[in-house]
Image (cartoon, rainbow, N blue to C red):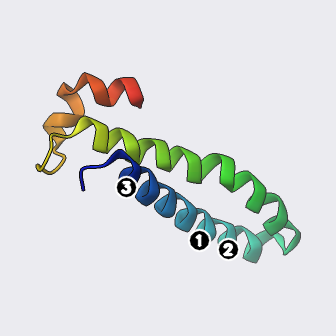
Amino acid sequence: MNYIFNGVLIGAAIGAGFSVFESSGYVSEYGLATIFTRSFQAIGTHTIWAAIIGGAIILGKQRKHPFTIRDFFTKPRFFVFF
């Protein structure tokens, strides 16, 4: 996976999935009306921020090498985008 767009898409999918599970927990505790409010807020919070982080990880890693913890601390491109 060497393209920034792939990282953005995977990050957005992970953020949206997390949002679904988190919202289902709130619905069981606070009722069904909560899901409508949470569904609009989750697009701007979990989904977009996870997409940005996914793109930053792909931008900061070396081509054809997995992203390592060392890259997280030593690559300035990751921090600029993050």
Left or right of 78? Residue 63 is: left
Which residue is pictured at 26% across the width and 22% down the height? 76
- Marks 2 and 3, the one that precedes in the sequence: 3
Which residue is pictured at 72% across the width and 67% down the height? 26
- Under circle 1, the secondary element is helix
Q: Amino acid at mark 2?
A: Ser
Left or right of 27? Residue 6 is: left
**Mark on residue 6?**
3
- Under circle 3, the secondary element is helix
View extreme (left): residue: 65
State the quadrant of the N terminus. Answer: bottom left
Q: Answer yes or no: do the residues labelled 2 and 1 have beta carbons within 8 Å?
A: yes
Query: What whole-number distance in Å separates the C-alpha atoms at marks 2 and 3?
Result: 27 Å
Q: Answer yes or no: do the residues labelled 2 and 3 have beta carbons within 8 Å?
A: no
Q: Amino acid at mark 1?
A: Phe
- Considering depth in this image, is 75 or 69 the residue closer to the camera? 75
Residue 20 picture location, percent across and down? 62, 69
**Disc 1 marks which residue?**
21
Residue 25 picture location, percent across and down? 66, 71
Query: What whole-number distance in Å separates the C-alpha atoms at marks 2 and 1?
Result: 5 Å
- Considering depth in this image, is 36 or 11 the residue closer to the camera? 11
In the rendered picture of this protein, how many numbered marks are placed on residues? Answer: 3
**Mark on residue 24?**
2
Mark 1 nearby-residue class (10 Å; few <14, some 14–19, many ≥20): few
